[in-house]
Each structure stands twice: as C-alpha cells, then as structure tokens.
Amino acid sequence: MSKTIERWSQKNSDCIVRIARVHNLAGELARIERQYGEQIVVEAKTYPGFWHSPAGRKAGDGQLIAVAKILNAVVVSDDRAVRLACMLENIPCIGWTEFARRVTLTQPRLPGIE
C-alpha cells in the first residue's frame, strides 16, 4: 500500500488516502484536530500540538489518533504530541522499540532454538 501511495503522490502534488466505510471517522478527525492541533493541555501544563511538527498542518497525527479511536487500535509513535493525545483519549500507544520487540525484529535468534 505504501508503494501505491508513493506512486500516486509522485503523479499528484497532493495525495489523499481515505478509509472507506468507517462510521463517524470524519467527525472524530475534526474533533481531534480541534482539540489537539494547536496545543495539548494536560492538567495545568500546555504542550505543542500536532501542527507544531515539521509537517505543520499537513501532519497526519490527527488522522492516526482518529482512526485508532474509531477502530480500537494501538497507535505506534514516539512523538510526544501523539502520545499525550493517546493518553487523554484512552488509546493504547506504544513506541517504535516496543513495536519492533512485539514483531520480533529485535529479538536475536539462536541457532537450533525456536
């Protein structure tokens, strides 16, 4: 899928990816972007939101959180804004190291041991 999207984005300057038949995804994305786009407030402390990343307003962080919320999925990210939004939305979030561990990419294989 990523190669297909890469080809499309080479042909078009803007590439839009849509997940079909996901009820209320657009509404949830709008809510997430409004709540966490500019800033994220945890208790009395304010943190930069999704739009303060190098990608700015084109960042896909809001989409990631909205899809995870709707589909009850686990988010994989080391980004602080994403992790804070996941915490506030009660979405499981793991880092890339934990993801690699779970898919056994970093676990050494000893000869003769399965």
Image (cartoon, rainbow, N blue to C red):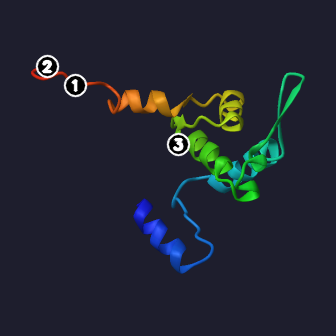
- Give coordinates of residue 77: x percent, y percent: 57, 37
Residue annotated with mark 1:
109
Q: Nearer the viewer, mark 2 or mark 3?
A: 2
Q: Mark 3 or mark 1, which is nearer the start of the sequence? A: 3
x 58%, y 70%: residue = 15
Report how far apart the C-alphas of labels 1 and 3 lie in the structure: 33 Å
Packing grade of label 1 (10 A; few <14, some 14-19, many >=20) is few
As displayed, is residue 30 above or below residue 103? below
Circle 2 SS class: loop
As displayed, is residue 37 above or below residue 55? above
Q: Quick one: 8 or 16, which is closer to the camera?
A: 8
Q: Quadrant of residue 9?
A: bottom right
Q: Amino acid at mark 1?
A: Arg
x 22%, y 25%: residue = 109
Q: Amino acid at mark 3?
A: Leu
Circle 1 SS class: loop
Marks 2 and 1: in contact by CB < 8 Å? yes
Residue annotated with mark 3:
71
**110 sits left or right of 16 in the view:** left
Disc number for residue 113? 2
- Give coordinates of residue 38: x percent, y percent: 84, 46
Packing grade of label 2 (10 A; few <14, some 14-19, many >=20) is few
Q: Amino acid at mark 2?
A: Ile
